[in-house]
Amino acid sequence: MGREPMDLAAVVALLLLCFGIAGVASDASDHRYKIGDSVPLYANKVGPFHNPSLPVPLFLHSETYRYFDLPFCAPGWFPLFYLLICMSLCLCLMLTEHVTEIREALGEVLNGDRLVDAPYKLNFLVDLDSKQLCKKKLTKEDVAKFRSAVTKDYYFQMYFDDLPIWGFIGKVDKEGKDLGDYKYYLYRHIHFDVLYNGDRVIEITVHTDPSALVDLTEDREIEVDFTYSVKWKETSTPFEKRMEKYSLTSSQTHHLEIHWFSIINSCVTVLLLTGFLATILMRVLKNDFVK
C-alpha cells in the first residue's frame, strides 16, 4: 500500500517533466517573459549576400536556402533522451513537435521564410559565457559545403521573439595572398547581445568571434566544437518602438527597386506561359476544325 503513492507521484512527476519540455513556460504571443523563460528562436534561411542577379547586395533577395541545408548543429538530441522515457505514456508526438517546421503565415511564405526551431537556447535574462551547442564531426562533404558557402559570403537569418537577426557564417582570408592561397574559415562561436525593457525583449544583435575559427581550406574530416554566448542588457526603449529601426531599413529606395524587379519578372513569366498555352490551344482547335 505504501508503494502505490510513490508510484503515483513518480508518474505525475514524469508527466510534468514531459509537458514542461513540450511546452513553453510563458505565452510568447504577448511577448512577456519571466526570468528563465524560454524565448522563441527560429532559424530561417541562408543565402549569398551578393546576389549576382541583382545590382545591389541585400538580405532580401530571391536566392535563399533552408538553414539546415548546411550541416549546422541540429536540434533534437535533448528531447530524444526523454522520448525513450515517455513512449509508454504516448507522449512521443508532443516531444517531437518542436523540431518540426514552424507553420507560417501567407506573408512569410511569400517572403520565402522557412522557419524551423534553432538549436540555440536563449532564456530570458540568463547570461551564458560559453555554452557548447554541439561537438560535430564534419565530413569532407560537409567541409566542402561550408567552404562553398563561405566563398559566396553566405549569411544566416533567424527570428528571436519575432525580431530578425543576421550574421555571416564564415570569412575568406585574402590579404596578401594569391587566389590559390586563399584561406577559408567557419565561425564556430556566436555571441548574442539582447536588450530588454522590463519583461519584454527590445533588440537583439549577433556577433561572431574572429578568434574562434575553423579552417575549411582543405577537404578533410574535422571535429568542431560549436559554442555560443548570451549577454542581456537593460534599455529604456519602449516595446512599442522596437520595430522602428527595421521599418526605417525597409523604407529605403533599393527595396523598392527589388520590389519592381520581382513584379516585372513575375509578369513576364505569366505572359510567356499564357502565350505558350494559347499557342497549344490554337493548334488543338485547328486540328479539331480540320477533322
Image: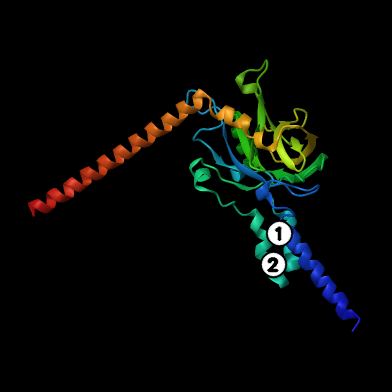
Q: Position of residue 229 (x, y in %)?
A: 79, 38
Which amino acid, mark 1? Ala
> Splitting the image into 4 quarters, where does residue 277 fall?
top left
Q: Position of residue 82 (x, y in %)?
A: 75, 62
Residue drawn at x 72%, y 40% is 201
Q: CA distance from mark 1 to mark 2?
A: 9 Å
User: Does dot 1 land on a helix, a strand or a loop?
Assistant: helix
Q: Is residue 53 visible?
A: no
User: Does dot 2 land on a helix, a strand or a loop?
Assistant: loop
Residue drawn at x 65%, y 20% is 174
Which residue position holds label 1?
22
Which residue position holds label 2?
91
Q: Is residue 50 visible?
A: yes
Q: Is residue 119 left or right of residue 180?
A: right
Depth check: give the residue in front, 226 or 85.
Answer: 85
In the image as oriented, which residue stretches furthest toward the right?
2
